[in-house]
Amino acid sequence: MEKLPIIIDCDPGQDDAIALLLAMSCTDELDILGITTVAGNVQLDLTTRNARLMCDIAGRDDIVVYAGCEKPLERQLVTAEKVHGKTGIDGIPIVEPRAMLGQAHAVDFIIEALLGVTDAPITLVLMGPLTNIATAFAKEPAIRNGVAEVVLMGGAMREGGNISPSAEFNILVDPQAADRVFRSGVPITVMGLDATHQVLSTKERRDRLRAIGSEPGRAAAAMLDFYNKFDSAKYGSNGAPLHDPCTVAYLLKPELFQGKRCNLSVETQSELTIGHTSVDFWHVTDRPPNVNWIHTVDANGFYDLLFEGLSRYGNA
């Protein structure tokens, strides 16, 4: 089995952090060419530090982290400390990371990597606001030819919004960037709230992660213990949705997910509904499909995959 070459763009965030730990455990399946960071859940300096800390916890000193855009294309940055805490990954000790920090800007790294494709195109795994990717596409449109697929977490249809009545956080932070990406013409699979709200990090599942005994397993459980406090109260659910790891799980085991080809358009003007993702699920317009909209997840299969991945690190 050939490894799938990927670039992960993220804004950790506990759920991004767990997605990184899962991806970095899959050394036989995924070839992580680099991790890029963007401002989102917290400011850029913190998302970059948090990504590097996950590399340390995973023992992946071969992966370089590249810092990217520190603000959205046109709007003021909105962050989510009330969900993720002041560090973005509250729940675990914060130390100075050892993992490599690349000298290049994330946008330039993405462009160079995609222009350098000579064999297998690269899959972009996007877990935060889409500022870096939109900027890269605008700066060098030819890089789209090097993209195998974009798999991203963002948007909502039936679930409404989680940061406004209409919008999901990643899209609302930079709706103009999201609009550019969805209009780019590259193949896109979308994990919106309709899917991610099905994968709840219940106490039983957190305890199972903790029982793995590895440092990544304990870190994941500890971060989720904090992360659950806000969302469990907000939704009245038995556990918080684990959003971003759905992107990595889809790469590893797509049969856990069901999707439908739809048109997705982003509202960029209305202050009332800005960031809203209009998903033409029933094809009531003549707008051509531009995404694979994931609407159903096998939650038990998803968590089995997460447990198996974090168990690969062994006990420590």
Image: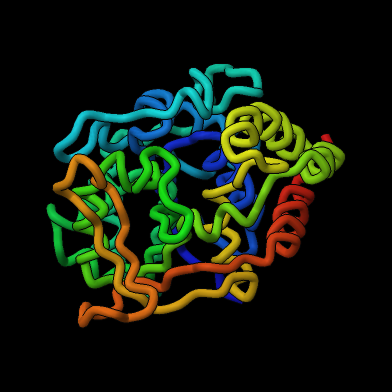
| Coloring basis for residues | rainbow
What residue do we see at 26% from left, 53% from top? 178
What residue do we see at 52% from left, 68% from top? 295
Taking depth in this image into account, of 62 and 97 the one nearest to the observer is 97
Task: Please state if 237 lies on the left or on the right of 211 as rendered.
Answer: left
| Residue 52 appears in the rendering | yes
Residue 48 coordinates in the image, percent (x, y) = 42, 31
Q: Quadrant of the N terminus?
A: bottom right
Q: Quarter-wise, where is residue 219 in the image?
A: top right
Q: Quarter-wise, where is residue 206 in the image?
A: top right
Q: Quadrant of the C terminus?
A: top right
What residue do we see at 60% from left, 49% from top? 24
What residue do we see at 42% from left, 37% from top? 11
Task: Please state if 50 lies on the left or on the right of 217 as rendered.
Answer: left
Taking depth in this image into account, of 143 and 202 the one nearest to the observer is 202
Residue 209 coordinates in the image, percent (x, y) = 78, 42
Residue 266 coordinates in the image, percent (x, y) = 25, 57
Taking depth in this image into account, of 261 and 247 the one nearest to the observer is 261
Taking depth in this image into account, of 70 and 276 the one nearest to the observer is 276
Residue 227 coordinates in the image, percent (x, y) = 61, 31
Task: Please state if 203 lies on the left or on the right of 7 as rendered.
Answer: right
- Number of marks in the rendered image: 0
| Residue 135 appears in the rendering | no
Task: Please state if 202 lies on the left or on the right of 105 as rendered.
Answer: right
